[in-house]
Amino acid sequence: MKRRVLLLSLASIIMVVIAFGTFTTSVFASNLNIPKGETPSGIPFNKMEETIDQYVSEYIGKTTPGASVAVVKDGEIIFLKGYGYADIEKQIPVNPKNTVFEWASVSKLFTWASVMQLVEQDKLDLDADIKTYLPPEFARKLNLKQKITMRDIMNHAAGFGDYAFNTIVFSPDKLVSLEEAILRDKPKQYYKVGTASAYSNYAASLAGYVVQHISKQPFQDYEREHIFNVLSMNNTSAHPTFADNKKILESKAKGYLPDQKGGFILGNWSYISHLPAGSINGTAEDLARYAIALTPNGEEQSPLFTNSDTINTMLSPSYNLDGDMIGTAHGFFEYVGEYRTLGHGGNTAAFSNQFTIVPEERFGIVILTNAYLEMNILFGLQDLLLGKEDKELKSLEEELPSSSEVAGHYVPMERQEGNFVDFAKYIGLYKINATDTNEISMTLGPYEGTYIQTKPYYYEIVDDNLPIFRNAYPILRFKMENDTVKQVIVGHGMDLSALPQGRTIPFLITSLVVLIISSLFFLIAPIILLIAAVRNRKKQVEPENRRFNLYHSILVLCGTVTIINNFIPSAKIMMTTFITFAEVKPHILLNYPLLFGTIFVGIFSVNSMRKALITPKRKVMYIVTIFMLILLFALLIGWNYFILG
């Protein structure tokens, strides 16, 4: 599914970028008629295969084991080719006609088409309260704090933060129904609806449930009947367990993750309960058929709709807080280029994909890979075929605000508010530096994009060292409030915000210092107490002193266990984007007895200390222990480590 936690995946990206292992490339191509003309970037069609081959060969075996590429033009598939391996171990090459990939968040484009079909039939109004189309009891349980519409959902502007759990599971027996998943995995509506674009898998899932309720069909059945069958997409399934098209399991590719040696390790297939957000599996050829259906000529009718106005509406801008911004078209994301370009990417646990169309040119690209967070082929090939917008950017002659006004740290609007996963987005903040009067750089770890101010508080990218910047953050518009930046408007689900109150840099630094000091203390203190106990084991100890020593030792162990207990779920969040809440819930629940036990023992220890005759050193250590426990639990409370859900 769409990159939900980019910061948590930096290590994987680095390994991908620096991997230079050798790999035997296998190629499967389809013989197609090559039309006259050229790609939007100017590559003649009769030279396109050679150009694509040359580019893709640089990355096959390095950033992904295999790839399947399709290009459509004027209602025909003009290029269809597989590269590398669908299964490394068995040396099975990628075949673009039958090798099945996980489409991840590209699946959302089918959800939006399903929505627009119902709009065309006057069964759904994009601007009506979504509760209108939900069962009353379900809507009550949903307990939305703000009114939202389908348009808000399609724009990723429904107020929802992220929800880090249960997005993907690795076994079909862990799947739940769509209704259960929606009610179970509710994120917080923490920002005002329509004021920001924050990517939301949950919102897409809710949209699919609306389609399911209106059509009175399971969502996956609706997609099969009204889209897949209509387009003869016979090697495709949206069913979470492929129940409607079992045969495609025989040709599904294995998914992989890069390893530290420049090779690949076998990953997991992904199973998705929130199926409208990313459950489709299929071939490049089938996805190319969808690209063709979205790019009819002016005289043709898309087979998906009965009225040409419907597809025109779907592909028209629906969210844009600034007329010059790259925005969203009813769930389709706009990309920077010579032509107006629409599409969507997607990532599961071991697959990465990109789907792009240029309606004006009736041109489309499908790129499917079987590697986690592959970027070079996805974005590089897209730029190669579509062409980057190559214009000389200049600042206006009028005096512009100093770029120093927008310098600072920013956090994604797509963040988890209200439980402990909130910490993850603050580990590697987006940092903006003023590099010149009208120039800034935005950095994320070792990656950087350079921007120039072309009008007040409006910056356009001019250079980057990672494709994610040009494709996800091509334009930054800084929304000012009381002469300070309130929000960075990016669009297509990628808006950033200034650090909220309670999460400022001084607070973050203090949190880090407290975490480090308390962790060191409660890992070292037990050793010190153990050494002291061994040394004094033969000495006669008064009962009150023995009791005090016991209480003190228990307090130290409470701190040690608390550190370890909370390190485990935090490490799981850091190591993988895809975990279930069931995996971390026991750790959050354990914090309660640890806190109350610490308070209980602490009260008894204070009474015991008054009666005991203890050394000044032991008294100092006891006071430090109490102080560190207070800081530790305050830190955990401040970062929502006591919040369930």
Image: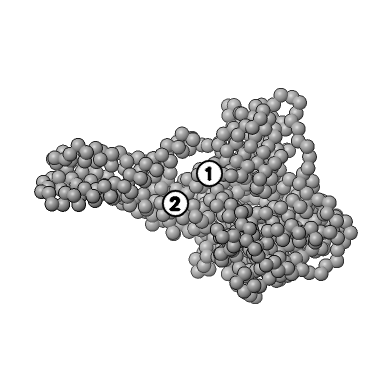
Q: Is residue 286 visible?
A: no
Label at residue 428: 1
Q: Give the amino acid at mark 2.
A: Ser
Q: CA distance from mark 1 to mark 2?
A: 15 Å
- Would you say the residues marked 1 and 2 are in contact, meaning their CB atoms lie under 8 Å apart? no
The residue sitting at 80% across, 56% down in the picture is: 363
The residue sitting at 20% across, 43% down in the picture is: 605
Q: In the rendered view of the protein, which quadrant contains the N terminus? A: bottom right
Residue 606 located left or right of residue 520? left
Place of residue 291 in the rendered image (x, y in percent of width and height, measured from the top left): 75, 59
Which residue in the structure is indicated by mark 2? 570
Q: Is residue 121 above or below residue 221?
A: above
Regarding mark 2 in the picture, which secondary structure is present there? Answer: helix
Place of residue 411 in the rendered image (x, y in percent of width and height, measured from the top left): 55, 41
Q: Is residue 364 visible?
A: yes
Residue 550 located left or right of residue 193? left
The residue sitting at 65% across, 63% down in the picture is: 22
- Quadrant position of residue 57: bottom right
Place of residue 399 in the rendered image (x, y in percent of width and height, measured from the top left): 71, 24
Q: Give the amino acid at mark 1.
A: Gly
Label 1 neighbourhood size at 10 Å, few (<14), some (14-19), many (20+)? some
The residue sitting at 49% across, 35% down in the picture is: 505
Q: Nearer the viewer, residue 524 or 568?
A: 524
Q: Nearer the viewer, residue 240 or 205?
A: 240
Q: Is residue 456 above or below residue 593?
A: above
Place of residue 374 in the rendered image (x, y in percent of width and height, measured from the top left): 64, 56
Q: Nearer the viewer, residue 112 or 210?
A: 112
